[in-house]
Image: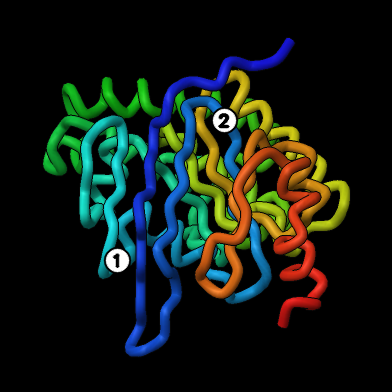
């Protein structure tokens, strides 16, 4: 059964970003449709992470705008982006290494907590009820990601592949509409990559979450993506289905180095 791809949920229009005199992104436009897995690929230094950083408000582009669910912004603010329902995992894990798996994933629920810090600190009244509710959701995520045996383990003691899974869990705790994944398979062995692919497909399928993915492993990208946008030296050189991109001469030359 083929899945239903919806309307455009995120539209990136004419984004340009420079650091000093160096252009990281030049006039990039593409869109993301609801419920799709949209990959951003390209050689090292192509501008992929810079693009994600513009979407989730870490960088402010000099030109262009981003439309999310019909609202247009020239600059996205990180907190506002998270509140609107965009979550992100990072290439370099930004987990709290001394805290347990459960507590790390709980930090992803902070934006969803309504009781004030005073009540939260005392764990009284509404805060206690709320925490029980949030813990229940976190336990569901732990079950979904098959990390129950490690729920009380400090994250720093886990192997790398499982730490990446905790990072994904923390992003899922926000219950995002759009999930930005920055190289979720980096540094993994074949088995870990297969597991991560399965979880990404399940998140997309079972939760209906739209996924925007940066990934270097071409096999993975071609297997799980609905559409692919290709960057090279900060320019867009391809955009379409995996087959379109695979057969695009400019993309082939960028990857094989014949164009440089």
Residue with the mark numbered 2: 36
Residue with the mark numbered 1: 61
Per the image, label 2 sits on a secondary structure element best described as loop
Q: Position of residue 75 (x, y in %)?
A: 22, 57
Residue extending furthest toward the bottom: 21
Question: Residue 202 occupies which quadrant of the picture?
Answer: top right
Let me know if residue 163 appears in the view.
no
How was this image coloured? rainbow
**Residue appearing at x 35%, y 78% in the figure:** 18
Work out which quarter of the rendered image holds the N terminus and state it: top right
Residue 243 vs residue 235: left or right? right
Q: Is residue 132 above or below residue 223?
A: above
Q: Position of residue 56 (x, y in %)?
A: 35, 53
**Residue appearing at x 71%, y 63% in the figure:** 250
Question: Residue 134 occupies which quadrant of the picture?
Answer: top left
Q: Is residue 133 above or below residue 246?
A: above
Residue extending furthest toward the front: 249
Number of numbered discs: 2
Given residues 199 and 151, the one toward you in this image is 199
């Amino acid at each position: 059964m083929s899945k239903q791809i919806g309307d455009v949920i995120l539209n990136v229009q004419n984004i340009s970003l420079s650091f000093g005199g160096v252009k990281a992104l030049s006039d990039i436009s593409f869109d993301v449709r609801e419920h799709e897995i949209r990959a951003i690929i390209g050689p090292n230094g192509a501008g992929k992470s810079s693009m994600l950083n513009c979407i989730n408000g870490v960088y402010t582009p000099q030109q262009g705008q981003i439309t999310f669910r019909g609202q247009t912004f020239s600059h996205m603010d990180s907190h506002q982006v998270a509140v609107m329902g965009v979550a992100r995992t990072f290439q370099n894990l930004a987990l709290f290494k001394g805290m347990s798996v459960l507590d790390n994933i709980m930090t992803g629920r902070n934006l969803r907590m309504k009781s004030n810090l005073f009540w939260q600190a005392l764990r009284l009244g509404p805060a206690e009820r709320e925490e029980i509710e949030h813990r229940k959701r976190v336990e569901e995520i732990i079950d979904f990601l098959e990390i129950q045996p490690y729920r009380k383990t400090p994250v720093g003691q886990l192997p790398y592949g499982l730490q990446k899974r905790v990072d994904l869990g923390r992003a899922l705790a926000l219950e995002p509409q759009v999930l930005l994944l920055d190289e979720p398979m980096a540094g993994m062995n074949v088995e870990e990559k297969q597991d991560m692919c399965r979880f990404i497909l399940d998140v997309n399928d079972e939760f209906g979450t739209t996924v925007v993915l940066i990934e270097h492993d071409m096999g993975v990208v071609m297997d799980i993506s609905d559409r692919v946008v290709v960057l090279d030296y900060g320019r867009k050189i391809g955009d379409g289905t995996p087959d379109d991109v695979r057969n695009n001469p400019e993309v082939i030359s960028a990857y094989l180095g014949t164009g440089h």
